[in-house]
Structure formats: C-alpha cells, structure tokens
Image: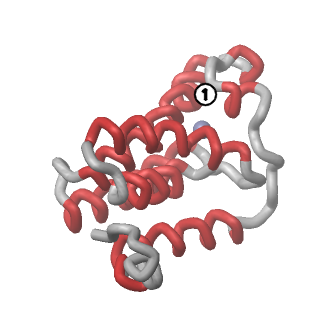
C-alpha cells in the first residue's frame, strides 16, 4: 500500500481515537490490514513525495499535535522496514512484519482501491458530519 494512503487511513482512524497514543497504535494496526489488500506500490522517491504531501496536509489542517497526525505517523511508520530493506537489499522473506514478508496483498496494476480508500478517509477527515450521519440517531458520539 502506498505510504500516503496508509497515512490518510491512520489519520481518519486517529480522528476517532481518544488519545494520540491510541491513534498511534491503531494507526499501526491499520497498516497491517491495508497491506493485506490488493494494491500497487511505488518506488521510494514517489512514495516519499506522496507521504510528505499527505503528512503536510494532515499537519497543516489538524496540527502536528493532533490525534489525526499521530494516527498518520503510526500508520506510515511500519513502511520504514520496506525502505531499509530496499536500501540494504534485504529480501522480503526476511522482513519482520507479516504483511511485508508473507501476507502482502496481491499486486495490482491500477490504483483504484487505493484512490477509493483515500477518498473515504479524506471524506471522514474533512466532512465528518456526512460520515457521522445517522450516528447521532443511534446514540453514537461523533466529533
Ligand atoms: Zn507496509
């Protein structure tokens, strides 16, 4: 999964968390689920540019001290393992995270699933009233 998509997913989850620590942890857990989905990865340079953009948008709109930013960092951080592996030429079979070594999602040619996931996350981040529609009626709290 593209690291920027991980960051957006973590930010969306982080916005629903009670603390930055919880956001960081759940963001990291979301990384495993997202990596298991069929997807296409990019080269390190493109991944870095997109991740910087995603973190920049989240940081500028929610703040670097926000739960959203903590969730984004937690979700993107596990991909440091991939960067280290590519730089040091370590085979994926020797990586620590199971979704990087053996349970990695099927490789796809397109980005449709990642674009769709990103749009849902952006909607959750920037249009929370829409994503919470009906939640209040059921007694769920929505910030
Ligand atoms: Zn990953």
Q: Quadrant of the C terminus?
A: bottom left
**Would you place residue 137 above or below residue 32 in this image?**
below
Seen from the viewer's position, the closer of residues 35 and 20 is 20
- Residue at 64 percent across and 45 percent down: it is 33
- Residue at 44 percent across and 84 percent down: it is 133
**Would you place residue 14 above or below residue 118 in this image?**
above
Seen from the viewer's position, the closer of residues 30 and 79 is 30
Question: x and y percent of residue 46 in the render?
Answer: 52, 53
Question: x and y percent of residue 92 in the render?
Answer: 72, 24
How many labels were placed on the picture? 1
Q: Return the residue at label 1.
A: 86
- Say how the picture is coloured: secondary structure
Q: Quadrant of ligand 1?
A: top right
Seen from the viewer's position, the closer of residues 132 and 2 is 132
Horizontal side of 118 relative to 99 (left or right) equals left
**Would you place residue 56 above or below residue 126 in this image?**
above
**Would you place residue 96 above or below residue 35 in this image?**
above
Q: For the residue carrying disc 1, how many other residues have a C-alpha within 10 Å: few (<14), some (14-19), or many (20+)?
A: some
Q: Secondary structure at mark 1?
A: helix
- Residue at 48 percent across and 37 percent down: it is 28
* Quadrant of the image occupied by residue 87: top right
Q: Is residue 105 visible?
A: yes
Horizontal side of 44 relative to 54 (left or right) equals right
Seen from the viewer's position, the closer of residues 97 and 67 is 67
- Mark 1 C-beta closer than 8 Å to ligand 1: no
Question: x and y percent of residue 58 in the render?
Answer: 30, 61
- Residue at 61 percent across and 39 percent down: it is 32
* Quadrant of the image occupied by residue 23: top left
């Amino acid at each position: 999964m593209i690291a920027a998509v991980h960051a957006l997913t973590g930010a969306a989850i982080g916005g629903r968390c009670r603390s930055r620590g919880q956001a960081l942890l759940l963001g990291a857990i979301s990384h495993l689920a997202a990596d298991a989905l069929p997807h296409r990865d990019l080269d390190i340079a493109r991944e870095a540019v997109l991740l910087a953009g995603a973190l920049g948008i989240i940081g500028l709109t929610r703040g670097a001290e926000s739960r959203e930013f903590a969730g984004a960092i937690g979700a993107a951080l596990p991909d440091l393992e991939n960067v280290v592996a590519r730089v040091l030429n370590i085979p994926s079979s020797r990586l620590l995270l199971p979704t990087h070594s053996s349970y990695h999602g099927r490789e796809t040619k397109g980005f449709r699933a990642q674009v769709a996931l990103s749009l849902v996350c952006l909607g959750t981040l920037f249009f929370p009233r829409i994503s919470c529609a009906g939640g209040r009626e059921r007694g769920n709290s929505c910030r």
